[in-house]
Amino acid sequence: MLTDEEREALVKYRLEKAEETLVEARDCSEMGHWTLAANRLYYAAYYASSALLIKNGIVAKSHEGVIGMIGQKFVVTEVLSKEEAKLLARLQNMRKTGDYDDFIEWYQEDVEPLFEKVEEYINKIKTLVEPK
């Protein structure tokens, strides 16, 4: 069980990690590494999602658990939209296929439109976890 201070520090760390990973995704895209950019976009959204769960005292032990808890606790209650949940699931699928499937590559037209959506997702989560 985390103390309030530990929870806040972990939330802050995960949000910083989300921002850093978004920069990594941009760097990968500038070099034309679109499959790696998709991977980093997923992790940027994942870190932000985990920050939201941690802030709310929700434990998820896997990537699927994070996505499931986001759906159960924040989409059902309309804190996050179905489109945001679909974005997270799509990014996870892109990451998995890009990392593990043979002959799968992501290209600029697949990945580039996702940058703005991931940035918006991270910013929305920041507003949800920041002290009011």
Image (cartoon, grey):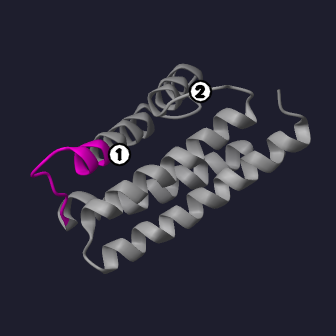
Residue 41: x, y in percent?
A: 41, 56
Q: Is residue 41 above or below residue 57?
A: below
Q: Is residue 116 above or below residue 23?
A: above
Is residue 118 one of those drawn in magenta?
A: no
Q: Which residues are magenta?
A: 95-107
Residue 57: x, y in percent?
A: 74, 27
Q: Is residue 117 above or below residue 69?
A: below
| Residue named by callout 1 | 91
Residue 83: x, y in percent?
A: 39, 37
Q: Is residue 82 above or below residue 14?
A: above
Q: Residue at x 37, y 42 (%)?
A: 87
Q: Residue at x 59, y 22 (%)?
A: 73
Residue 20: x, y in percent?
A: 57, 66
| Residue named by callout 2 | 60
The answer to which of marks 2 and 1 sits earlier in the sequence is: 2
Is residue 103 one of those drawn in magenta?
A: yes
- Counting every numbered tag in the picture gives 2
- The secondary structure type at the circle numbered 1 is helix
Q: Residue furthest left?
A: 103
Q: Residue furthest bottom?
A: 31
Residue 130 in view, yes or no: no
Q: Quadrant of residue 115?
A: bottom left
- Amino acid at circle 2: Ala
